[in-house]
Amino acid sequence: MKRLLWLGLLFISSSWLFFIPIFTSTEWKTGVFFLTIGILCNIIALRKDKPKQIDKKHLVLLIPLVLSILIINYPYNIGLIVLAIGLLVYAVTNQLKYEKTHAVIAGISLSGVIFTIQTALFPFYSIIVSHGHRIDILSPIVSSVGNLLGLKTSVNNGIVFVQTFQQTYPFTTTLEKLGFYTWFNILIGFLVLLVLLYGKRKILLNIFIFFIGSFLYLILRYVAFIHLYISTVELDIFWNPWYMSISFIPLALLLMKILPLKDGDIGTIFSKNLKINRKQVTALVMIFIFVFSMIGAFAFQDPGCKKNGRVLIDEYHSDWEDTTKPLTKDWYGMLSTYNYYSWAEWLNHYYHVERNNNTLTTSLLENYDILILKCPTNSYSTQEIWSVVQFVEKGGGLYLIGDHTDVFGMNTFLNQVSDYFGIRFKTDATYELGTGMMSVYEPDDMFPHTTVQNVKQFDFMTSCTLEAPFTSENVIIGNRLISEPGTYSTENFFRESTASPESEYGFLLQVVAVKYGKGRVVAFSDSTVFSSFSMFSDGYQSFTLGVMEYLNRVNSYQYLNTVLFAVAIFSLIVSIYLLRNERKTKILFLFLLVGLLSFSTAKPVFSYMIGLHYPLPNAHSDYIQVCFDQEYSGFNVSLQPTLGLYYEKDNYGTFYVWTQRVGCIPSLEKTLEGATKKGDIVVFINPIKSFETEDVDTVTNFVENGGRILLMDSIRNSDSTANELIGNFGIWINYNTAHRGLHHSFNDSSDNSTIGNITSPYLSITGGERVLFSENNETYASVAEFYNETTGKTGKIVVVVDSYSFSDPIMGGAFTEPDERQMQIFNTEFFIFEELLLNDISTP
C-alpha cells in the first residue's frame, strides 16, 4: 500500500507548477486539485500503519505555524497551512475521542512536511537554473538514445540536431526540457520518506537506485518529447504544466515497482513522547541559530558607508540613448524621446549628475562616486577598462546598461568591462513565454533585493539575459520567460521566430549585482525602459533610485554574509550531533518547531534592516510633479514603443509624455490620496468613478494649499462623474445637442468623424474664467483660482473639453513628427500647462 506514496509525491510535486509562475500564469484551483490528490494518495498509503496515541505536546507546533503562515506570503505558506490542518484534525478528533483518523492525520501532516521542505529549497532551485540552464554534457547521451529510437541526430557545440525530411531542428539540452523542477521536488519528498523509513545503509542503496532509474527515465522522456515536437512543432509541450505532470506518471509507476517503500511506520510521525533534556535544549538553540544565520547569509545586505552621490554618465563611448540634447517643444520624431535626457535630468534632482565626453581615466573617476556605462557603441581601451576596475575596487559604484541581441554591439563592448566582475551580457532577447509579448516582473516580498524593494511592477521592453557567478546578488530573476538567440540577419538582430527548440525558458537572470573590493556593480539588461517616452511609469523611477542608493555605498561588512553562512553550517552540524541518538521523527519535529520560530523572527528582522538602511532618497532640488489619477479616471497610458498602441481610443500616452516638454515630471498614481500628497498638479481624464464627500474634501484641501487640478472630459465618456467634483468649485460641464462650430477643432483621420466640439451632441463648460472658447461664445476650457490668505498660495482648477482631442489617435505616438493639425494640439497642451497650470505655481 505504501507504493502509493510515489503517486502522492508526484501530485504534490506537480502542484507547484500551477502555484508558482515559472512557465505559465498561476492556476491555483488546479494546484489545489493536484495537491488534494497527492494528500489523498498519502492517506490511503498510510492506512495500514499502526495507530498510536499522539503526544498532545505536538500541538505546540501550531504556534510557530500560525506565525509563519501570517508572515510568509502565498503560495509559499501552503505547506504550513496543510501541516496546520493535520494538527487541527488531530486536536478535534482527540477532543471527540474519535480514534480512526490516524491515517488522515499522518497523510495530511506528511504532505505538509514535504511541501514545506520543498518550499524551503525552492530558492536554491531558482538560483541554480537562472545561472545555468544548459547541460551540454548530456547532449551526446540524448543523441545516442535518440538514434536508437529512430531519430537521425548529431551533436555540435552541445546542441542536438535532429534531421527530418523537411528540415533540421536544433535542440539544447536544458534542465527545463528534462523536467528538472518536478524531478527535484520528487527527490526532496523521497529523501524525507527515506529518513523516516530506513536506516543509513538502505538510504544509500535506495538513493542509488532512484538516481539510476530516474536518470534513464529523464533521458527517455526528453527523447519522446523531441519526437512529439517534430510531429506537432509546438514548443509548449516542453513547459506546459499538464504535459509535464502527466509525463512523470510513468516514472512514479516505475519507482512504485523498483522502490516499493515497504518498510517502516510513518504513522508514528507525531506519536512519541516529547521529553526535552538539557542537551536537547542546546540542540534547539543551535537549530534556531542555524535557520536564522542561513537566512541572514542570503538576506543580509551590507549597509555600507554612504558616499556623496556624484554621478558620471559616459557619453564618450555611446551614440545611443543620448543625455545631452534637451526634450523641447521644437524637436520631434523618434530620437527626441528615444533618449536618456529626461532620465538624466530627473536623476540630477537626487544626485549630482555630470556627462563625460572624454577618455575614462583614473584621475577623472576619482572625482565621482558612481559611473554609468550605458549602451556603448564603441569599444573601451585596455587602459580605460583598468581604470574602471580600479575605480570599483576602491569603492566606486558601476552601473552597466545593455540591451537585447547585442544591438549596435553594445553588449560586446560592455562585456569588455563586465568580464572582470564575472558578468556577461548575452546576445539574446526575452519575451513572455507562450505569448511572445513583453514581460512583466513583480517582485516577491520574500527578501527582495534592496534595489527592487520599493518596486511594485516592472515592465520590460525586451531585455537580454545575463551570466553571473552563483555568489552574485540576484536582483531580478524573471519568470515565465523565453530567451531567443539573436541574429545578425535582421534589423535590430531579432529572429523572426520567438520560440524555437534551442531557446531557453523559465527563470532567467535579467538584473544582477556583485560586490568587488570596496565597490559595487549592477548590470541591467534593457536600456529602452529609461528612455524619455517611458521613464516615468511602471516602476522605473523606484528601480533607478534603488540602484543608485545601492551603488552609492562603500562596502563595510560584505564579509558578514560568509560569516553567517559558516555559522549556519556549524550550527547545523552541532545540532545534528547532539540529536544523533534521537528518533528521526522527533528530530524532524524539533527542526520544524524551532526552525519556524527562527524564520518568524529572521524575516521581519532582516526585512526591517533592508528598509532601514536603504530608503529611497529625497530630492535635493524641486521639480514640478504632475500626477495622473487612475482611481477615478477612465483612461490608459501605454508607453511601449509599439505603433498599434497609439490608436487605442482611451490611450493618452503622448499627452502624458509631452508634460516633460514643459519641464514637468509625470507619474501614474493608483489613488487620489497618493496623487494629492505627491503631486503639484493632479490630472483627471474622463472621470468615471463617483466622488464621495471625503474625495471632494481631499481635492479641496489640495487646491487650498496651492495645488493645481486639470480635469479633461469627453463626449465619449457616457459615465462621466466630472460634475460631482468640479461643481463644488463653481464649474460645470454641459451636454449640448445643437450643432456648433468651434475654434481648435480637429478631424479624426481614423474614422472620418469630426473631433472636438463641433459634433452634435457636444460638451461645453459654464463657470470659471473662460480661456478657450468658440466663435459662438461657448467655453471649452475654463479656470477657477482660489487664493489662500494664510499660506499666500493660489490653487487652480482647469477644466477642458473634449479630452479625446488629446488622445493618441489624434496626437499620434511619442515618436510622431507632427503635421500642422497635430502641432496645433501640441501647442494647446503646452498652453494649458504653461499659461494656466504652471503660471505662478509654488513648490514645497
Image (cartoon, grey):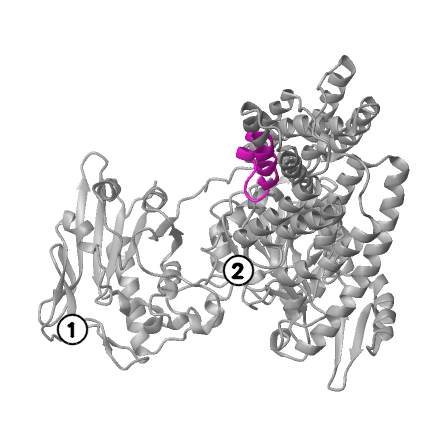
- Relative vertical location of residue 581 with respect to residue 797 in this rendering, above or below: above
Q: Secondary structure at mark 2?
A: helix
Residue that carries the numbered disc 1 in the rendered image: 742
Do we see residue 218 in this rendering?
yes
Main SS of residues in magenta: helix
Of labels 1 and 2, earlier in sequence is 2
* Secondary element type, mark 1: loop
Q: Residues within 10 Å of mark 2 (few under 14, many from 20)?
A: many
Question: Where residue 99 sits: x, y (%)?
Answer: 62, 28
Where is residue 713 drawn, in percent x and y? 23, 61
Q: Residue at x 38, y 66 (%)?
A: 654
Residue reaching furthest to the top: 278
* 643 horizontally vs 452: left or right: left
Question: Which percent across, then down, holds residue 769?
Answer: 13, 56
Residue 76 shown in magenta: yes
Residue beneath disc 2: 529
Label 1 is placed on what type of residue?
Answer: Leu
Q: CA distance from mark 1 to mark 2?
A: 39 Å
Residue at x-position 49% and y-position 64%: 325
Task: Name the foreground residue: 675 vs 588.
Answer: 588
Dot 2 amino acid type: Val
x%, y% of residue 391? 71, 46
Q: Quadrant of the N terminus?
A: top right
